[in-house]
Structures are given as structure tokens and as C-alpha cells.
Amino acid sequence: MEARRNKIHGEPHHLFWSICGVVFFAAAYRWFLVPAGLYGGGFTGIAQLIKLFLQEIVGIGIPEEMDLTGVIFWCINLPLFALGYKCLGGKFLYRTILAVFIQSLLLTFIPAPSSPLLDDLLLNCMIGGALSGLGVGMTLRAGGSGGGLDILGMYCAKKLPDFSVGKINVLINALIYLVAAIRYDFEIAAYSMVFAVAAGFVTDCTHDQNIKIAAFIVTENKMLGDRISKAVCRGVTSWEGWGEHSRQGKTVHMVVVSKYELQGIKRLIKQEDPQAFVMILLPETTMGNFEKRLEVL
């Protein structure tokens, strides 16, 4: 099963969705965030504040058609690449470098409208944030990242079970927008926070590897639990049950996996026992030795 999945979801597949993700993110930034005069979140927001500092404090003139946010974004990402390699491996690193490179180009050269696409600023923030979060989530799901807070978020989510990339982004963005509110404009900072919250929510919904799933399988196949354990390298708990309607013995297998891994389990169950009864739950929390696997091999 794993060999077939790797063949179908090979490296070109992951790179394609990773690049699609950064395209969505850059489009949200240039088409929704910039025309509305909002402050970007994460390292994009830090890059934006650095650009404003260079323009207003240092007095460096930057042509409007050449937004240096992408260039600054690339430069401040360099120290985080080592952290990404150490925590999540070589494939994550080179996918991230490619994604950051393309994202930097897009942030620099995608034309931004002179005025917001939507008259309602709140609606502009919600739609732009959702598009941004979708892009970030797609890139993370494909085993890469857009750099910056995505790398920090992946590191924290891997080390701390209750954290996610979206939550980390919202927390750090709150600090960035606090600085922006004090130094520049409180109302714009507040709208920017709405953009960030919408983006963080959609990111966590899209990033399947971050979502835990508990699966209960009722079957007559006693070996199915062992097959599932070997397929996903997760612990499976099994016990004997009794079907009151069929008056026959049943075996119940329980496993906790990520939503990303669930697709492979569904295929395995359909192959081994199409008549199995499966119940999927979203546990509020898990305690014990549950390994978060955020990377894609």
C-alpha cells in the first residue's frame, strides 16, 4: 500500500501543490493585503515593517513598482533553514527553499491593485486571510513551507503537542500588530489581525498532518490491526467484541493517526475487509506517546 501511495504521491506531486500554495499566499498578499494598506503577518509582516523603517526613518526611496518586501523576506529566512533541516529533514528543507524563492519573486513582481478589490474592508480581510491560510496549509501539507513562521510553527508543533502552525502564527502576529498599532495605525492593525486569524484558522484546517483522528474499526478480520500498524507505523489497540445483531464475535481495532495518514488506512480497510464498520472521531486531546509527524516523505 505504501509503495503505491508513494508512486501516486511522488515528488512532482508534492512540489506542484507546494508551489500552488505559495502562489495562493502571494496572491492574497498582493491582491488583498497590500491594496487595503494592511500589515502582513509573520516574517512577511516583519519584512514589511523593515521596508517601512527604511523608507520613513532611514529615508531610502523604494519605487512603488519594485516592492522589496520579497527580497527582505528571503534574507531574514536564511537562518531558519538550518532549523528546518535539523527538525524536519532534507526534503522539507529543499522544498522550503524552492517555495521561499518562488514566493519571494511573486511578492516582488505580482502587481497590486491601486485600491482594495472589495469595498467592505472586513470582508476583504476575511477572504484574503482565508486565501492566504489555504496557501500556507497546502504548502505544509505537501511537505514544505513558505519559510519564516511556518518553520517556527512546524518546530513548535512537533515539540509541543498542543501547538499548531496556525496558533503560533496568530500569537506572534499579535505581537507584530501591537508594534504596528503603537507606531502606525491602530485600526489598520486591528483589521490586519482579522486577516491573520482567518489565515491561521484555514491553515490548521488545511494542514492534515496536524489534525489527529481516532479510528475504531469493527471487523471479523483479527489481523487487520497488525496490517494497519505495519502500514502507518502506529500503535493499534485491539479487543474482542460481540455483535448483538449478527450474534457473532467481532474484533475492534483502535488507532490514533493524523488526518493525512487516515486516507491510507481507509484504502487498506477497503482492501482487507470492505464490510468493516468504521467510526472516525476527532479527539480534543491526546496524552501519552503520540508522535506528531508533520513532514511528508
Image: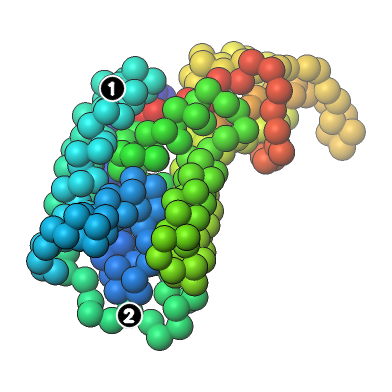
How is the protein colored in the picture?
rainbow
Is 80 displayed left or right of 205 in the figure?
Answer: left
Residue under the point 69% across and 17% down: 288
Kindly state the secondary structure of the residue where label 2 is placed: loop
Q: Quadrant of residue 277?
A: top right
Q: Amino acid at mark 2?
A: Leu
Tell which of 192 and 3 is nearer to you. 192
Q: Report whether residue 271 is seen.
A: no
Kindly state the secondary structure of the residue where label 1 is placed: helix
Q: Report whether residue 172 is seen.
A: yes
- Place of residue 111 in the rendered image (x, y in percent of width and height, measured from the top left): 16, 69
Q: Is residue 294 above or below residue 259?
A: above
Residue under the point 14% across and 52% down: 105
**Which residue, given by chain and number where applicable, does mark 1 sit on?**
82
Q: Is residue 34 above or below residue 279?
A: below
Is 120 displayed left or right of 74 in the figure?
Answer: right
Image mark for residue 117:
2
- Place of residue 248 in the rendered image (x, y in percent of width and height, measured from the top left): 83, 25
Q: Is residue 176 above or below residue 78?
A: below
Tell which of 294 and 63 is nearer to you. 63
Image mark for residue 68:
none
